[in-house]
Image (tube, rainbow, N blue to C red):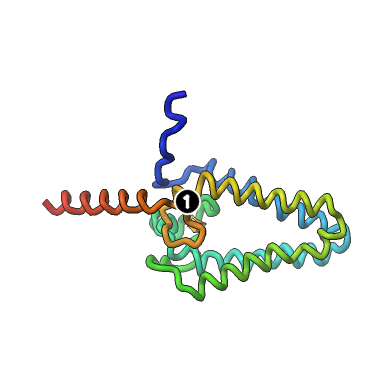
Amino acid sequence: MEGCNKKIPLRTDYVFSDFLFFWCISLVPEVIACVAIARDSWLWMGIYISAMVPFMFAEVGFLCRHCPYYNQLPGRTVHCKSHWGPTKYFKPKPGRIKTYEKFILYFLFARGFAFPFYWLIQDPLLLVLYLWSIVNFVWTYAKYECPRCLYFDCPFNFVSKEAKKELMAQSTAEKDSNRG
Ligand code: SF4
């Protein structure tokens, strides 16, 4: 079929269905974890869900602030795979993500991943579904999204060196033609 083997173009912006798709696949592990925890304790399920809120703010503060999509629209609006609407909680800070910010993010991801294990290991079926849904999510993004994302400094960015070089050359050429 024509077009099937074409390179996937880098993403210049997002549409609402990208946002819905991200949330559809990224919420599956959390829902499975909630089911496993709620079978034992509704209180702990509430704690699990509440722990997500500071995590989301930390993600915006340490990762998204440096992202070009975060800074793309005026005002507080962000349109990307995981934000849609007035979600610019912190001032954009274009530039490199710091090493300590990466470590905080890795720590928070690891903590979020490990939190429900106490309950999941009590139900092997839910444990398998939890791990499977995470593999599906990571695989989908690593294959279709991260290799085309303009946030080159993100620790999960997979854009090839050639594509980055091509883009840099294009933007330098554009700048030169605007000057001339
Ligand atoms: S694309 Fe990723 S890093 Fe950029 S603003 Fe959206 S969630 Fe944050």
* Picture coordinates of residue 74, whole percent (x, y): 38, 57
**Is residue 25 at least partly visible in the picture?**
yes
Q: Is residue 159 left or right of residue 50?
A: left
Q: Is residue 117 left or right of residue 9?
A: right
The vertical placement of 1 against 125, above or below, is above
Residue holding disc 1: 79
* Picture coordinates of residue 79, whole percent (x, y): 47, 51
Query: Residue drawn at (41%, 38%), measured in percent from left and top?
Result: 7
Query: Residue drawn at (11%, 51%), measured in percent from left and top?
Result: 180
Q: Is residue 42 left or right of residue 1?
A: right
The vertical placement of 102 against 138, above or below, is below
Query: Residue drawn at (70%, 66%), measured in percent from left and top?
Result: 50
The vertical placement of 16 against 2, above or below, is below
**Is residue 75 at least partly visible in the picture?**
no
Residue type beneath disc 1: His
Q: Quadrant of residue 44?
A: bottom right
